[in-house]
Image (cartoon, rainbow, N blue to C red):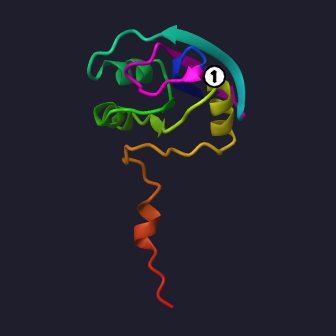
Amino acid sequence: MKIAVASMGTIVAGHFGHCENFTIVEAENAQIVSMTSIPNPGHKPGFLPNYLADMGVEVIISGGMGGGAVDIFNQRNVEVIVGAMGDVKETVEKYLKGELKSTGSVCHNHEHAHECGEHHHH
């Protein structure tokens, strides 16, 4: 699978659109196979999510992201993880182990859906 991390060098960027580079990580069987850094091609509305999706990215990891970008990623079936911080490689390894949870301010993810449907009346 292909994972993109919005980065400032080797650190996860605080904001998706304003990052210096994207670290494109190829992973197989929960192991990192390769990491490639590409420069941020420029912050134009709606451009970056499609640019990354067109490259075959399946997951985007960032510190923060605007709702517009999240919506496009969702339309392109790219998983969005926000609220990440620290070293890019460690962050991706956590994701691959299933330990990285999206804690972002953007709530388009379905983590809370099950809380609504399961009212247990004892």
Q: Measured along the vertical axis of the image, is residue 47 above or below residue 105?
A: above
Residue 67: x %, y % from top left = 30, 37
Q: Residue at x 62, y 25 (%)?
A: 88
Nearer the observer, 59 or 89: 89
First to last magenta residue range:
11-29
Classify the position of the N terminus by image quarter: top right
Q: Nearer the viewer, residue 5 or 59?
A: 5
| Location of residue 32 by image quarter | top right
Q: Position of residue 63 (x, y in %)?
A: 48, 32
When the figure is inspected, residue 4 is found, relative to residue 74, above or below; the finding is: above
> Is 114 situated above or below 87?
below
Residue 70 at x, y = what percent? 35, 35
Judge the density around disc 1: few (<14), some (14-19), many (≥20) Cα neighbours within 10 Å.
some
Residue type indicated by callout 1: Glu
Looking at the image, the residue that sits furthest to the bottom is 122
Q: Check residue 26 for magenta coloring.
A: yes
Q: Is residue 121 left or right of residue 26?
A: left
For residue 110, above or below residue 83: below
Rendered residue at 68%/17% (across/down): 34
Mark 1 secondary-structure assignment: strand
How many labels were placed on the picture? Answer: 1
Q: Which residue is at 52% across, 20% downward?
A: 7
Q: Nearer the viewer, residue 87 or 38?
A: 87
Q: Could you say which quadrant of the image residue 65 lies in?
A: top left
Q: Position of residue 84 (x, y in %)?
A: 54, 35
For the residue pair 87 and 6, the one nearer the viewer reads as 87
Decide whether residue 39 is among the magenta residues.
no
Is residue 43 shown left or right of residue 23?
A: left
Circle 1 sits on which residue? 26
